[in-house]
Amino acid sequence: MSDDFSAQIRKEREKREKLKANINQENQSNFVSLSAGVAFDKDIYDTADKFTDYVPELELEGENNNFSISNQTKKTKLTQDDVQKLISEAKQELADENIDPFKVDGAPSKVISERENEYQARRRNRILSPERIDAFKTPDSSQGKDKPLKKKRWDVVPEEDIKTVALNKASHMIADNLGLSLSSSDIESDATRVEIKPKKRNRWDQTPLLVVSEDDIAATPQHLSSSANFEETPKRTRSRWDETPVITHSDAMFTETPIGNLGMATPMISHSALASNDSAIYMDQDVGPRNRFMTDEELDQILPNEGYEILVEPTGYMPIRTPARKLMATPTPMVGVDGFAFQEEDRHQDYGVTKEIPGVGALPFFKQDDIQFFGKLLDGQDEESLESEEIKDRTIKKLLLKIKNGAPQLRKSAMRDITENARTYGAGALFNNILPLLMAPSLDDQERHLLVKVIDRVLYRLGDLVRPYTHKILVVIGPLLIDEDYYARVEGREIMSNLSKAAGLATMIAAMRPDIDHIDEYVRNTTARAFSVVASTLGIPALLPFLKAVCKSKKSWQARHTGIKIIQQIAILLGCAILPHLKHLVECISHGLEDEQQKVRTITALALAALAEGAAPYGIESFDLVLKPLWIGITMYRGKGLAAFLKAIGFIISLMDAEYANYYTREVMVILIREFQSPDEEMKKIVLKVVKQCAATNGVSSDYINDEILPEFFKHFWIRRMALDKRNYSQVVETTVELANKVGVGAIMSKIVNGLKDESEPFRKMVMETLEEIVSNLGSADIDSRLEEQLMDGVLYAFQEQQGEDQLILNGFGTIINSLGVRAKPYLQQITSALLWRLNNQNARTRQQAADLVVKVALVMKVCGEFELMANIGVTLYEYLGEEYPEVLGSILGGLKAIVNVIGMTDMNPPIKDLLPRLTPILKNRHEKVQENCIDLVGRIADRGAEYVSAREWMRICFELLELLKAHKKAIRRAAVNTFGYIAKAIGPQDVLATLLNNLKVQERQNRVCTTVAIAIVAESCAPYTVLPALMNEYRVPELNVQNGVLKSLSFLFEYIGDMGKDYINAVTPLLEDALIDRDLVHRQQAASTIKHMALGVVGAGCEVQILHLLNYLLPNILETSPHLIVAVLEAIEACRMVLGSGVILKYCLQGLFHPAKRIREVYWRIYNMMYVGNQDALVPFYFSVEDDEKNYYQRCELDYIL
Amino acid sequence: MDKFGMNNQTDHNFSKYVGTGNPDTTKHEWMNNQLRDTYAYLIANDSLTTYIALAEGESISRVRFNCLEKMIFPCGPSPDKNPEE
């Protein structure tokens, strides 16, 4: 095949040699530079021929080549034959070795461009300056000159492109599949394949591939224009001047100019930062003498005169001008002037030392690519010698650099600066710096987030000044709307919405209108999404007239397609908020169902589906208009079009009332059943979904489903292949469950129950999951004895044969057997023996599953009265407590717990007094699962059967429990703390309390906190008077931790005992007094929180005197500034208010509300406000009376009335 | 800076309620609120309205009306304001 191509290529080159025209200049003029000026969207309402500067065809090459730098060498121009290919492959391997060895394997790259898929990477093909500008500026005679030249340019089809296109064709199928999976959520993915029409515009920066004019066909390989290629996704070619030319050692060596000039601009990535003086630096720093291009004189010197010929550079040649790409480019293997030299070491590596940028300060990092944008700041020019514009530009750059690379503090101040001065800097200077940065290939998530934030802030400030930049911002922000990262999408939406608020509807429409029928599907896609955000921001009604016009556009189907897609996106974005406008929206797109373009019909159906989904369960009347075309459509179309129509019908049927739903279901079911056998995955999913939706409506009878749907359904979907794909699998399960809801358990179960004994594990799982859901929804009453036998047989088989790690089979087993209840009795013997056998299995996994199953069946065993079997299992589990795998041990403990729970402590076999001593050492196990299950079991025994074990054993367990308080998992700590309570109740609090109080002396905070909680729980379960004396005695220990621990225990204690607290207030008051006048802040904080809990417990219990007394101790603390303390104190005052009433607190407040010192007033007003918000009414009687003065009267004489 | 600790936004929340104060609240503002609160309280409680009506010898509706009227400028014009304005 490749021989064939290279022949064509050779032919091609000959042709090209003949056609050396002065096209270069022409190309030059077509570039729109970003810095050249502001791009006003002036041509919006001008329908003059704005397509003149587009090359009127599409190219087919995969555009991912275009900018993927790392692949640079891979796609070198293959000029000759396979040998050349081998050479380049070798180079590719070399390049691969340069991959960063420190890069974490497998983890997604932080750099956005590296993990983008091919479709998302298309964003970089977009140009910041709207290309249509030129068309507007030169609508006159120059066009005439342009055209023939351009045509010639198309004639010169670069050989590389031909080759890649040919290769592309070979991998057509693969690429196609890829395309599908890329946007598989959207069955409209074929819309990515734009059909090529001969008379279509193209972009100047793309290399045309298809030849338009007939006379050129000879020059282009015939197969390129074959229909297969027309369906190819229009991907962007990497145009030949983006390529790094590799010098090959063939005779064609110098047909191409070696690595090109520097410092020239490419419109893709901003070159503005790399002005002339930067490029000088760049030359010095990064190119080095070895890679510097040679002058003609130098070449003359080193090359012999004979045998060489000086050729004119190729017609399409354009040097690389993106420095970023140059940096990464493979060094040309060309001998430099100096002859051989060791490769210069890169002295500019920073070795982790932060780099100082003049005027910016130290930065945590400065990436190689940053030079491109911020190189200007490094040139060391004196700012005073520059013009004001230049200074402004540099200031913005500095700020952006600080924001992008700076430490948080630096970043914040820079962000504030740029926001506050946004209007001074001006929209132009700002966006011309920010937007190219956002398009940089090396951008990572954090940087993007920061820059997007800058845009957001700046937008607010600039207001309508952003208008001229609307389109540029859209180009940059649009891709965020289809980012896979949710937060990026949200960010994008927010910017978009702020932009539309700032720029206004007219500007937004004006900016995006030209993109609506853009040739590139990617552009249209982002545009549609952007419009949907605009609609949600400015309201659907505002956009509706425009949408109507677009959806009915006669100019191009792309416009209609995009218009309808906008409505689809609006429905997705707004959900039920579309309801008020539903009728209009449907009217807007209804005609699209009969469009002559299949893609338009498809998207219309999808948009209708989205609208119906958003509107559910209302709004059926709005869809009346489209019912007929939809139903006609499903009889007419096949394939993707049909799938979309069916999807729409499915969603609309769910809105209908019973009668209509029944009728339409019957109509559509014929088609659905026909499509059951479709091999298309997408179609399968949609068919399943529609069947589910139809079955869910009221109007469909179970007889109908039984007779018409079920036989075909099971034939086509309950097959092993469906279980292999996760999405199909869940769809089948959902649909079957929905059908079962209509036809009952028996009908479905009898059909699939045999699948439990299928040889394919995924299929068994699919059956099990379905059965589990059906049984848990509908119960098992419908299952007859024969089916029951089959079911249990299958379930047991599936359980024994399971290989996987997941809980699915186990849960299914549990659900089914519990649902059967007493009917499960005949099978329990069998289950038990399987269980016991498997507990003895060599495989740890099997043992674990068996132990887990015990948990599931324990309850049923009790229901069936099989105590003997249970005791049997209990003993076996007990014997296996020596298990070494922690996961298995955890499960065994869980099983034991389940059995103990069911049997009860007295009947437990093995007896509790044997079981518990075996558990004590297990508490030492560090594995969380073991700890949790063990502590649960121990707690259970302590709660219910503490008397079976000696007090000494319980104390031993207490010491073990202290260790568990260190656990990371909260559930474990909580279980341990509760167990203290149970044990204390069983053996009396004294010993436990002593242990706990001792534990207050430990250093670790978490341990102490848990201990205080445990003390409080012990006090709660054994009555506070058993604990308080010892606890208060402990306060006398002159140690901060202990005293604080005591206070904290008191705080928890009063929280737990609630209104019992009133009996203990007098007892603890002296202690609290002491704590509240302690120097230590924490003492006072804990005392305050104790008072809070105490006061809240005794509201209305007649303890006002004591609380008032404590309040007097509390009040001086209100002037504290420590955050924890002041919060605790204010809360305590609030709690005191509950007891004492607002009047008392108001009186306390009065002394400070008008204090001369503001800081004192502040806190008093805060207390006043707390009170006011909490209970304003209660204040009215307590406001003191104020005398009138000469101007105002303050008396409230109504309150003085006495009858 | 963060004088009242982590819950500093409570100040902000309080300021949403009419009638709460801050360190710069003047006597006049505070009394205004107090009087309004009082009248609102009188109107809202039927028994109090009846009691006042009895004491004043007015009808209940008149008492309500009077209270409402008084809530407009409960204690006269602000002392800071120039009489000319």
Image (cartoon, coloured by chain):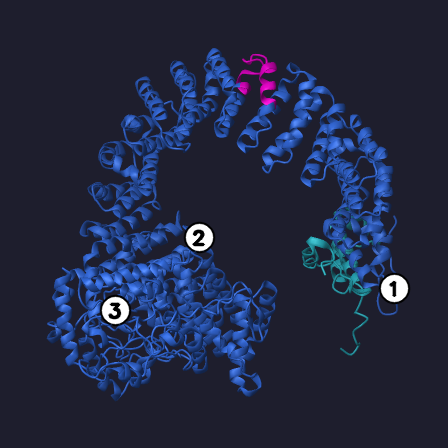
Magenta region: A900-920
Chain where mark 2 sits: A
Above/below status of A686 relative to A244: above
**Would residue A815 be found to the left or right of residue A691 on screen?**
right
Identify the image quadrant of the N terminus of chain A.
bottom left
Whether A917 is among the magenta residues is yes
Alpha carbon distance from label 2 to label 3:
48 Å
Q: Spot the residue most to the top.
A: A868
Rendering colour (chain A): blue
**Residue occupied by mark 1:** A1188
Q: Which circle's residue, 2 or 3, is located before the other in the chain?
A: 2
Tell me the kind of residue under disc 2. Val
- Which residue shows up at 75% across the image and 47% down it? A1128
- Which residue shows up at 26% across the image and 51% down it? A645
Tell me the kind of residue under disc 1. Asp
Q: Which mark is residue A104?
A: 2
Identify the secondary structure beneath mark 1: loop
**Residue occupied by mark 3:** A556
Q: Nearer the viewer, residue A1084 or A822?
A: A1084
Identify the secondary structure beneath mark 2: loop
For disc 1, the neighbor class at 10 Å (few under 14, some 14 to 19, many from 20) is few
> Which percent across, then down, holds residue A510?
38, 74
Rendering colour (chain B): cyan
Q: Is residue A75 visible?
A: yes
Tell me the kind of residue under disc 3. Ser
**Would residue A524 be found to the left or right of residue A452 on screen?**
left
**Would residue A485 be found to the left or right of residue A752 on screen?**
right
Chain where mark 1 sits: A
Count of numbered labels shown in the rendering: 3
Could you tell me if the residues under marks 1 and 3 are in contact, i.e. CB atoms within 8 Å? no
